[in-house]
Image (cartoon, rainbow, N blue to C red):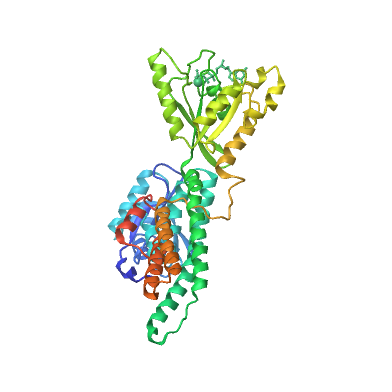
Amino acid sequence: MRENLSTWNDTIVALATAPGLGAIAVIRLSGASAIEIVASVFSKKSLLNQPSHTVHFGKLLNGKDVVDEVVVSIYRAPKSYTGEEVVEISCHGAPLIQDEILQLMIHAGARMAKPGEFTQRAFLNGKLDLTQAEAVADLIASNTDAARKTALHNLKGGFSTDLQVMREKLIKFSALIELELDFSQEDVAFANKKELEILVQQLQIKTQALLDSFKLGNVIKNGVQVAIVGKPNAGKSTLLNALLNENRALVSEIPGTTRDTVEEYLNIQGILFKLIDTAGIRSTTEDSIEQMGIEKSKEKILGADLVIAMFDVNDQSIEQVKIWESEVDSDKLILVGNKKDLVKDNTLFANESLKEVIFISAKEKENIKALENTLYKKVAGEGINKEGTIVTNARHVASLKKLSLALNDVETGLQHNVTGDLLALDIRQALHYLGTITGQITNEDQLDFIFSKFCIGK
Ligand SMILES: Nc1nc2c(ncn2[C@@H]2O[C@H](COP(=O)(O)OP(=O)(O)OP(=O)(O)O)[C@@H](O)[C@H]2O)c(=O)[nH]1
Ligand SMILES: [Mg+2]
């Protein structure tokens, strides 16, 4: 438990379910007086003596007026989400009723909760660490299966467990080194420097792996930008439609059909891809509107995480592949040869220069699955390791980078045989950055910032 608990003596209230009309709504209170406040307006037996984890049916009364018939659930401290006394009122879902009950609770002594304040209290009461609290926000905001899974992994403490193990080992060393300093006159060595060196190297590897996972973490959270580019008439818009399974973009045999970019989302095995259909690129065009579209396509290539470079396989395939390979980074590039249904000479598919190419027919929807698999693999490799920790939070990345630098300092110090007090200083610095991730070391502004991104009622 944390010491600043005593400052949290007011009781907060908020709507926990989505605002608007629903069959039922849940209003939640947390704080020392939560049960008293609800009991003071509850029609039935007194709630004050009821045990934790019980539900009670009754009426909420505003003077003599019945506001609603409700079910009240009681969770007593510390066995609740926040670690405080918590009451959840399930009422009928009309916005008017929700409002009236909130007003009633405020009148009886509660105050409106700030965004994320329930989770902030859970954190301050030691129920969650900071990475877990942040995972709660990610979980609520997750819109794909992969995002949900990584958030759940972190909520269960996946990320913090990894860091906690490192932290404990480092603390042990820093204690031993500091012990040595106390006995410096006697020239004894408690800490084994070789072991420390190995530990620091292991930590460095772990930190790098976590940093590397952010690239995947970021796309899991925010989606992958995929630009579909190529010459006019290559079939880009037809491909977009085939991937989406609907006629979203205009298709025609006239080159230069797509003028402005068309963007749509596609979920492949839990990862969100943002597909961007662009205007066909050709070297010269008289039409100034088309020219603007083309400039935009070039911009999209630069900004995209992946580029589907598309060409008509019946039109100078090898030359086009060469151009794309020289223009776009290989780990971003997916080469797609379209209109395979029109190919007369099948030997083309076996051509060595085209071995990276996925041959499809956008119009006949042939081989679209293979392209989807390639998109997925480019992002997730052989699959997202559900047990592995993936960093999805920019704040964690910033701390991990500083941690890595601090570990470097410890390593260099060890190599140069620096004195124990300098070494202890560097280790403490590394411990500090580890602590800022899990929240053992925080400041109020940072907490306010993190929790302000939550929705109200969580
Ligand atoms: N036979 C055949 N025709 C296709 C295929 N894919 C697209 N087409 C045709 O090619 C023409 C151009 O298709 P679009 O999808 O509009 O091409 P685009 O690349 O978006 O063209 P712009 O928007 O002008 O840059 C249309 O007449 C499509 O029906 C395919 O796989 N096979
Ligand atoms: Mg088009």
Compared to residue 1, the image places residue 294 above or below, namely above
- Whether residue 156 is visible here, answered yes or no, is no
Q: Where is residue 100? Give x, y as percent.
A: 33, 49
Q: Residue at x 42, y 84 (%)?
A: 187
Q: Where is residue 219? Give x, y as percent.
A: 49, 43
Quadrant assignment, res 371? top right
Compared to residue 141, the image places residue 199 above or below, namely below
Q: Where is residue 181? Give x, y as percent.
A: 38, 80
Quadrant assignment, res 310? top right
How many badges with numbers are in the image?
0
Q: Is residue 244 left or right of residue 399?
A: right
Which of the pair 401/167 is nearer the observer? Answer: 401
Q: Quadrant of the N terminus?
A: bottom left
- Whether residue 116 is visible here, answered yes or no, is yes
Quadrant assignment, res 84? bottom left
Compared to residue 375, the image places residue 284 above or below, namely above
Q: Residue furthest bottom?
A: 186
Q: Is residue 41 left or right of residue 360?
A: left
Which of the pair 210/60 is nearer the observer? Answer: 210
Q: Residue at x 46, y 74 (%)?
A: 173
Q: Is residue 237 left or right of residue 39?
A: right
Q: Is residue 129 left or right of residue 65?
A: right
Which of the pair 409/103 is nearer the observer? Answer: 409
Task: Write down which quadrant ligand 1 falls in.
Answer: top right
Q: Where is residue 399? Give x, y as percent.
A: 40, 57
Q: Quadrant of the C terminus?
A: bottom left
Compared to residue 190, the image places residue 140 above or below, namely above
